[in-house]
Image (cartoon, rainbow, N blue to C red):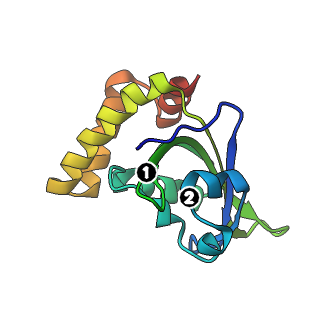
Amino acid sequence: MTIEMKEDDFIVSKTDLKGRITYTNHIFMEMAEYTEAELLGKPHNIIRHEDMPKAVFKYLWETIVKKEEVFAFVKNKTKNSNDYWVYANITASCNLHGNIIGYYSVRRRPNPEALETIIPLYKRMLEVEKSDGVDASFKVLTDILAEKGISYDELIISLQK
């Protein structure tokens, strides 16, 4: 079953450098169907849905370690095998010296019209990924961007509107 976020909800979480959850708000727990005790200290990918191409996460990690923010549409899986889509903003958290000390993510309800584009794109990427690997999957995305003459950020932000 797909669960939908409320229009005004925000999911917030923080992780350490290895992606282990160090903070989660109540909306995250409610959406993911986990308790705080079940989430704290666990890898954030505890909620990764198998419909998500690994290429999206490769791009995400390559970007945030450079202290650049990432926007992405992400399908998550709940403890009870339900799912939910989010429009995520992920950034590095830095100390006063500019060193990355963890990661911070705020997610909100995705534009339903955006999912009409994202779902088939991710499905195609996942098909390619299963047969030809993560790099080939990411090439599906970069080829679309080149064809449209836009950047990844321009595509994702324009879809969310």
Quarter of the picture containing the N terminus is top left
Task: Give the class, few, some or many, for how many residues have Cα within 10 Å of label 2's Cα (few <14, many ≥20).
Answer: some
Distance of label 1 from label 2 (alpha carbons): 9 Å
- In screen coordinates, is 40 left or right of 79? right
Q: Amino acid at mark 1?
A: Asn
- Image coordinates of residue 2 in percent, x first then y, are 44, 41
Residue 114, compared with residue 39, is above or below; it is above
Q: Is residue 159 visible?
A: yes
Contact between labelled residues 2 and 1, with CB atoms less than 8 Å apart: yes
Which residue occupies 32% across, 30% down?
A: 144
Q: Closer to the camera, 132 or 148?
A: 132
Query: Which residue was labeled with disc 1?
Result: 82
- Secondary structure of the residue carrying tag 2 is loop
Count numbered badges in the picture.
Answer: 2
Query: Which residue was labeled with disc 2?
Result: 33
- Secondary structure of the residue carrying tag 1 is loop
- Image coordinates of residue 137 in percent, x first then y, are 27, 48
For marks 1 and 2, the one nearer the N-term is 2
Which residue occupies 58% across, 44% down?
A: 88
Residue 119, compared with residue 137, is above or below; it is above
Quarter of the picture containing the C terminus is top right
- Image coordinates of residue 141 in percent, x first then y, are 33, 39
- Image coordinates of residue 43 in percent, x first then y, are 53, 72
Q: Amino acid at mark 2?
A: Glu
- In screen coordinates, is 15 left or right of 97? left
Q: Is residue 67 visible?
A: no
Question: Outermost residue toward the bottom?
Answer: 41
- In screen coordinates, is 66 left or right of 22? left
Which residue occupies 37% across, 22% down?
A: 148
| Mark drawn on residue 105 | none
